Image (spheres, rainbow, N blue to C red):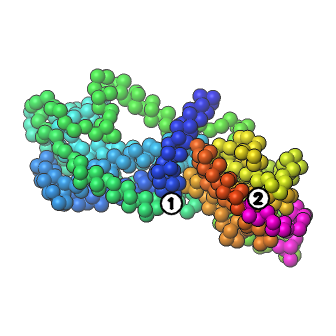
Amino acid sequence: MAIVASAQRGTRRILAGADAWMNRLYGWRFNPLYHSGALVVALLLVVLVTGIYLLFFYRIGAPFASVARITDQVWLGRWIRGLHRYASDAAVVAALVHALRLFAQGRSWGPRTLAWVSGLVLLFTVFICGWTGYVMVWDVQGEVLARAGARLLDVLPIFSEPISRTFVGERPIPGAFFFLNLFAHIAIPIGLGLVVWLHVSRVARPALLPSRKLMWGVIGLLVALSLFWPVAMGPPADLFRLPAPAPFDWFYAFWVPLARPLSTGFVWAVTLAVAAATLLAPLWTRPARAARPPASWVDERLCTGCEQCYQDCPYDAIEMVERTENVKAGASATVARVDAGACVSCGICAGSCAPMGVGPPGRTGRDQLSRVQAFVAARRPGAKDVVIVGCDRGAGGIAAGESFHGALVYPVSCAGSLHTSVIEYLLRAGAGGVLVVSCPARDCWNREGPKWLEQRVYHKREAELRERVDRRRVRLAHAAVGETGGVVAELEAFRALLAELEAAPREAEFDVVRECDTAPEEAAR
């Protein structure tokens, strides 16, 4: 476990630097690293569309010649084939980045196991499609890949005779060989839709495509690459000659130079070991039982049946069921119920419940109020103090300290789980302003935390920040863990705004805790 935790921390540090650099270039809304999973889907759609065009000109009886004719079509065929190739390569890169991010964030175990395993199946399927695609060209690279694949498959006791005999040159390559490659290259992608559906089946409101600007920007970049750096063909395959030097794709053929000097048995052993290690990641990456966060629960005495936690849950782990306990006059007919097997303990439901009756143990809205009371009693924020409510997984990494550039730091596990009564309490306790710094919206470990927080603070989404709270003294910001400078800039801008409000009268004192305690009774009336 210690080795896994160390590897995850190291990977997070690498990603933090890359994220900060990309955010400076494109902004967090268009950072491609945050959209890596959605980019895979977009790129596979590009591969599908360009593949349909190429299929019209491909001939099984003359594979190399037909691809050469496509490449000679300067106005369409050449760049479409290049786009098909580059989009395939980019899909592999995006999938690897997506998997690496999930591993680094510890999102590969428990209820997320299905997403992890189906994602690996998706990556393997894409790899097989790319492999068969290169063989279909039947240039030198296709021949090398075909021979290497036949060498590995010959070990398996599923063929009546060794496949490698097909390439000894004693007879022409049968058309059935190219038909099988074409069939696999077309038929396998049909199953990708099912795998993608499985991959997102445990999440609510999955974002299958990136933002339009990012998607078309990436596609435009690949089109430009296809136009100015066309994909070259190698010499035609010749079974009677040793393979000549040829263009080499490191994304799909990287394993060939590694496997060539090794025995087939050893290659299979290494392949199966790597496959088993990655598929079993949900087992060896999960924390010790004592360290696993508990699932949310519902206090049915407080539940008003409003369905807000049910609507806000990012993982469809909450359902509304008929009330069977605490049935009394004025009680709701339905009550929220948490599926512990689907809950990832993100706590977002705690921020969505006005009467504070749902959330992980110790992190419900009422628990949050008790905690902020202790914070105020210990730190005593004054009118000139800014309290930074910082997500401990982002927010420039400042949540680990007690203060930051003169501001008081109040850490939370996820900004989306923050109950707005905490913001109100901090202001009414005397703080000059509250700056809530969350992870960037597309990199929230709990998917929709920043989105729901903004809706609750500014757009009256339940459990909303009360109208009586001065919104000028509340500011929301986004910062990745490596963007400390961004937090400094937001803090200074907020302080400048608060300075303009110095002369404005503060709101009268109000007992937030007392009102929250009576909220369920008022809702019942």
Q: Are marks 2 and 1 in contact (CB under 8 Å)?
A: no
Q: Is residue 522 magenta?
A: yes
Q: Is residue 376 left or right of residue 492?
A: right
Residue with the mark numbered 1: 207
Which residue is depicted at the point 19% across and 36% down? 246
Kindly report the distance in space between the C-alpha atoms of the residues bearing marks 2 and 1: 34 Å
> Which mark, by number, is residue 433?
2
Label 1 sits on what residue type? Ala
Q: Residue at x 59, y 35 (%)?
A: 9
Q: Position of residue 113 (x, y in %)?
A: 56, 46
Q: Which residues are magenta?
A: 498-525
- Quadrant of res 319: bottom right
> Is disc 1 placed on a helix, strand or loop?
loop
The percent coordinates of residue 116 (x first, y second) are: 52, 45
User: Quick check: 225 above or below 204?
Assistant: above
Residue displayed at 62% across by 30% down: 1
Mark 2 surroundings: few (<14), some (14-19) or many (≥20) residues within 10 A: many
